[in-house]
Image (spheres, grey):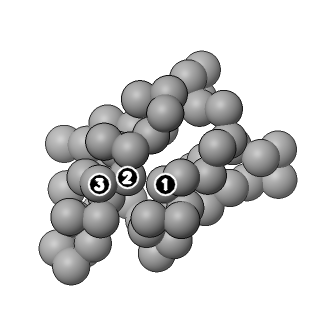
Amino acid sequence: MKATIDDDRCRGHGVCCTICPEVFALHDAGYAVVQIEDIPEEFEDAVEDAARSCPERAITTS
């Protein structure tokens, strides 16, 4: 699985970082970034939860 964040949509709420800090982080400007290119299986459910919970719907998974 891979996750991407639409930089134009992300507003830095940090919900994804709270749900799955192993995969998501806020960079210096305060917006979310994906820290792991290929998401390990043990984090897939949390990443999907983060994508569903994003208030701006900025996260997509594939």
User: Element at badge 1?
Assistant: helix
Q: Which residue is mark 1?
A: 16
Q: Quadrant of residue 49?
A: bottom left
Q: Specify the farthest residue to the bottom.
A: 42
Mark 2 highlights which residue? 50
| Residue 25 in view here | yes
Q: Earlier in the sequence, mark 1 or mark 2?
A: 1
Image height of 57 relative to 20, above or below: above
Q: Please name the residue shown 60% across and 20% down the image.
A: 8
Point out the tag, 3 or 1, that comes first from the N-terminus.
1
Q: Amino acid at mark 2?
A: Ala
Question: Neighbour class for label 2 at 10 Å: few (<14), some, many (≥20)?
Answer: many
Whether tag 1 and tag 2 are in contact, CB under 8 A, the answer is: yes
Could you tell whether 11 is left or right of 43 in the image?
A: right
* CB within 8 Å, label 2 to label 3: yes
1 vs 57, left or right, is left
Residue at screen point 46% across, 75% down: 22
| CA separation in Å, label 3 and label 1 | 8 Å
Give the quadrant of the C terminus. Answer: top left
Disc 2 is placed on an element classified as helix
Number of callouts:
3
The residue sitting at 64% across, 44% down in the picture is: 13
Please say if the residues under marks 3 and 1 sit with CB atoms less than 8 Å apart. Answer: no
Residue projecting furthest to the right? 28
Q: CA distance from mark 1 to mark 2?
A: 5 Å
Q: Position of residue 37 (x, y in %)?
A: 38, 59
Q: Position of residue 33 (x, y in %)?
A: 57, 50
**Circle 1: residue type:** Cys
